[in-house]
Image: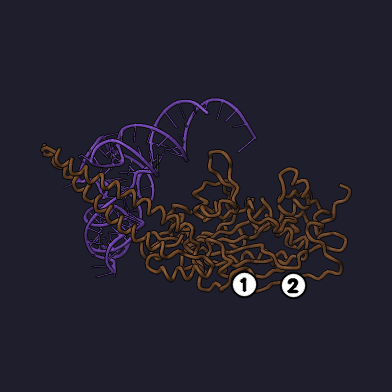
Chain colours: A brown, B purple
Amino acid sequence: MLDSRRLRSNLAEVAAALARRGYRLDSERFQALEERRKKLQVETQQLQNERNARSKAIGQAKARGEDIEPLRAQVGEIGARLEQVARELEEVQQELATMMLDMPNVPHESVPDGASEDDNVEIRRWGAPPSFDFKPLDHVELGALHGMDFEAASKIAGSRFVVLRGALARLQRALTQFMLDLHTREHGYEEVYVPYLVNADSMRGTGQLPKFEEDLFAIRDESGYYLIPTAEVPVTNLARDRILDAAELPQRLVCHTPCFRSEAGSYGKDVRGMIRQHQFEKVELVQLVRPQDSYAALEELTRHAETVLQRLELPYRVVALCAGDLGFSSAKTYDIEVWLPGQQRYREISSCSNFEDFQARRMQARWRNPETGKPELLHTLNGSGLAVGRCLVALIENFQEADGRIRLPAALQPYMGGQTHLEPRRGR
RNA sequence: GGAGAGGUGUCCGAGUGGUUGAAGGAGCACGCCUGGAAAGCGUGUAUACGCGAAUAGCGUAUCGAGGGUUCGAAUCCCUCCCUCUCCGCCA
């Protein structure tokens, strides 16, 4: 959510910044609502003031044993008017709140212009796409040799799910373990375990609600629970309605969870394979930082995610998302894209964002600034470190050999019982 | 699932209709005292919002959330949420 003061005092500027990302802010409507709000609020508060003063007078008169009936009659009239005005104010405020919950974050000035992912700007590359002296398989064909079973999954659940067996199931667990160890031991993150079902307040806090309900899976009973689409939701909400001590910052948290996404509106996109699933594993990095530190933290967090790919020897590139491709809550985002031989292109495997105070304002996540002594909104960031399913895809595609074997990078071997290769499954 | 207790400020805790934003204590900040520190003493110490040029002033709201009663609600009534204890069930 944007700062309402900033909207009031710099409406044109905010509207221009939002236009950069393709959001049309209805300035006239906002201004009209604001004017009504102001008028109604002043009136309401005046009436409340009057009522309070007279009620006190009644209390005093009563204490002195005087007749209070005439006073009561007066206050009654005020009450009736107050009720009317307060109701109108409530309506206007509701409309304003709805409008503001719908507004995306303002892009940071360093975010490149552009309308779609075609306008994203490549920042750097690491490693080189492998060359094969045979025709490399994509992960679906290759996975079939190693225990990746989409048919079984669709029988049990439906499309966009997968069953992994044997070494491949273990490989996914190994990847997860490796990532958690790297971030906790070398990057200074604290591991957390969190609920996978969350309430609507949490979803509102990070920005999934109210606008993107259709992307979520919801529980059908009266609980009001949603399945988390990313660990970002429960982990960032740890700070909701809290005032953190300056000494507690920065907080670096890492969390492995399954993620559940309805993928509404992605019909026909990545229908084949494990790239786009209703359920996938992810290791997520979250940072809660002082506002002045958040852009340095974004660079740092992105490097932490990149390190995973470097250790796994997987070629990738980093792109800065253009304004038009930014996520709703983000002020600036780097995507990390890994090379997929099966598609002969780079595909997103991590998305690292600085939300500045956008999420913090929604969830009232604050810290006490020692310089002012006051609670102030903190800044939140997160990034995948990494999407485990896609990482598994990248790994098997990049390290496949002519005979269907898959080489394991050295960093992973300790997590796979010292194995150096995955052998195709035979006769099972 | 059954029975009970409870949710007040950074924390503990008082408060059952009338100048209560809220006693008292702890913590924290500043000052005095001290060779220095502790103790002691004194002073201060919520948040959001509105009007406003204002870091001045004034006002409004906030005692889990929402609704109701009343001239007036932290205090009375209703609904919901959460926490704790005991019993049952259960991995």
Quarter holding residue A140? bottom right
Q: Which residue is mark 2?
A: A128
Rounded to the nearest whole Å, what is the CA distance between mark 2 and mark 1? Answer: 23 Å
Label 1 chain ID: A
Amino acid, disc 1: Asp
Name above or below for residue B6 compared with residue A420: above
Can you tell which quarter of the image residue B72 is in?
top left
Mark 1 crowdedness (10 Å alpha carbons): few <14, some 14-19, many ≥20 = some
Where is residue A23 shown, x and y percent of the image? 51, 65
Precedes in sequence: disc 2 or disc 1? 1
Using the rendered view, name the quadrant where residue B57 is placed: bottom left
Circle 2 sits in a helix, a strand or a loop, which is it? loop
Asked whether the beta carbons under mark 2 and mark 1 sit within 8 Å of each other, the answer is no
Task: Indicate left or right for A267 with A243 as reference.
Answer: right
Q: Residue at x 45, y 58 (%)?
A: A100
Percent across and percent down for residue B70 are 24, 37
Q: Is residue A313 left or right of residue A193?
A: right
Sort mark 2 into few (<14), some (14-19) or many (20+) by Cα contacts within 10 Å: few
Check disc 2 and give the amino acid type. Ala
Between A398 and A264, the residue placed more toward the observer is: A264
What residue is pinned by disc 1?
Answer: A119
Q: Position of residue B67 (x, y in %)?
A: 36, 40
Q: Position of residue A137 (x, y in %)?
A: 82, 62
Please tell me whether mark 2 or mark 1 is closer to you in this view.
1
Chain of the residue where label 2 is placed in the rendered structure: A
Residue A120 visible in image: yes
Dot 1: element:
helix
* Residue in the picture at 52% in, 56% down: A207
- A261 or A36, nearer to the observer: A36
* Residue lying at 84% horizontally and 59% vertically, measured from the top left: A405
Q: Along the line of sight, which residue is nearer the eye, B21 or A216?
A: A216
Say whether residue A135 is left or right of residue A105.
Answer: right
